[in-house]
């Protein structure tokens, strides 16, 4: 069946990607010379998929240029701060047909998209050893169960494809559960797992490292060495200057949140452990 369109989810704050995500959306960082979301849009268009809908929320104004540059459709998710990504799916429900659902921060080594797909699937890669990712149990190519954490397993990572039938089934379930308080914090994947028997998905297996995802700057540095010496973060530049060191000496960056679950700052290691607060723009030794 022909692919009707692609939905790219880009509304979230990506607070773990501190402090760059405090300054700009993670989807707009440059990786190996290309802006993440622009690379994904280009790959979709090269596959013949021209209707591309981007769900925005956090720092939405920074995505506006994409309309003129690529002719994409921007849909604003009013609830991006209050709901998990099920809110982004709900925001684009009128567009869901034979659709790719993509994460804006994925980097594909090669173009994984096609203009014709046969069945609904979730992309997976194999991880050896222990993992805290979403581990898949399959039977004859169909996903049977998904559990968080495991060992030597295929894990969910990357894009998915929904047929029109799957889209209709998922939206029927989502619309029934959307107003429930317990649904607010759920990923759309959690809702899928809770109704897995009603929502059959195949497993689409990709080689290791074919799909890249960077949760932290330290992870990105392993993939793109240019971030070792220059991250592009004004905050990290100031921290390095104040400490009299180079940016590459700032490592083990980890975000933390305030009592309202909002991004509050990050800790890092630079010979000692430090803490930086966004609100006060203050850095201190973390005892």
Image: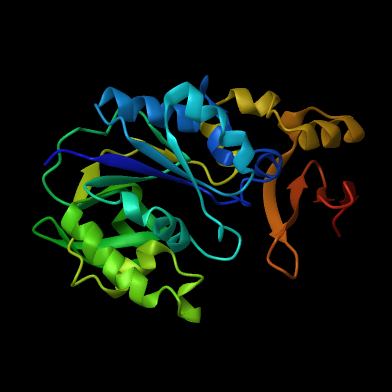
Please state the total of marks drawn on the protein image: 0
Q: Nearer the viewer, residue 19 or 169?
A: 169
The residue drawn where x is 74% and y is 37% is 250
The residue drawn where x is 41% and y is 58% is 131
**In the rendered view, does 138 fall on the left or right side of 157?**
left
The residue drawn where x is 53% and y is 65% is 83
**In the rendered view, does 145 fall on the left or right side of 105?**
left
Indicate the quadrant containing the N terminus: top left, top right, bottom left or bottom right: top left
* Colouring style: rainbow
**In the rendered view, does 138 fall on the left or right side of 184?**
left
Seen in the picture, residue 41 relative to 55 is either above or below; the reply is: above
Residue 269 x, y percent position in the rendering: 76, 45
Residue 260 x, y percent position in the rendering: 72, 69
Q: Nearer the viewer, residue 204 or 67?
A: 67
Q: Quadrant of residue 141?
A: bottom left
Residue 225 x, y percent position in the rendering: 57, 25
Q: Nearer the viewer, residue 68 or 27?
A: 68
Indicate the quadrant containing the C terminus: top left, top right, bottom left or bottom right: bottom right
Would you say residue 19 is visible in this rendering? yes
Residue 18 x, y percent position in the rendering: 67, 46
**In the rendered view, does 272 fall on the left or right side of 109?**
right
Would you say residue 146 is visible in this rendering? no
Residue ranking furthest to the front: 94
The residue drawn where x is 49% and y is 29% is 67
Residue ranking furthest to the top: 33
């Amino acid at each position: 069946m022909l692919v009707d369109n692609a939905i790219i989810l880009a509304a979230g704050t990506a607070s773990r990607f501190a402090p760059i995500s405090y300054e700009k959306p993670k989807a707009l960082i440059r990786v190996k010379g290309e802006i993440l979301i622009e690379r994904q849009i280009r790959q979709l268009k090269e596959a013949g998929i021209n209707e591309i809908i981007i769900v925005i929320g956090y720092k939405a104004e920074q995505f506006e240029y994409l309309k003129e540059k690529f002719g994409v459709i921007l849909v604003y998710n009013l609830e991006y701060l209050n709901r998990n990504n099920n809110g982004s799916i709900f925001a684009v429900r009128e567009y869901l047909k034979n659709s790719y659902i993509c994460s804006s921060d994925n980097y594909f080594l090669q173009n994984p998209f096609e203009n014709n797909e046969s069945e609904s699937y979730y992309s997976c890669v194999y991880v050896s050893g222990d993992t805290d990712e979403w581990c898949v149990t399959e039977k004859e190519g169909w996903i049977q169960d998904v559990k968080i954490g495991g060992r030597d397993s295929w894990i969910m990572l990357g894009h998915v494809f929904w047929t029109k039938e799957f889209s209709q089934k998922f939206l029927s379930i989502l619309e029934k559960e959307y107003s429930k308080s317990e649904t607010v914090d759920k990923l759309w994947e959690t809702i899928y797992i809770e109704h897995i028997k009603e929502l059959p998905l195949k497993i689409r297996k990709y080689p290791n490292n074919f799909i890249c995802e960077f949760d932290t700057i330290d992870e990105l540095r392993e993939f793109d060495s240019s971030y070792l010496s220059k991250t592009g973060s004004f905050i990290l530049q100031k921290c390095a200057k104040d400490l009299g060191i180079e940016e590459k000496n700032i490592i083990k960056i980890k975000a933390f949140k305030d009592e309202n679950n909002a991004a509050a700052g990050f800790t890092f290691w630079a010979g000692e452990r430090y803490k930086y607060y966004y609100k006060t723009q203050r850095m201190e030794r973390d005892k």
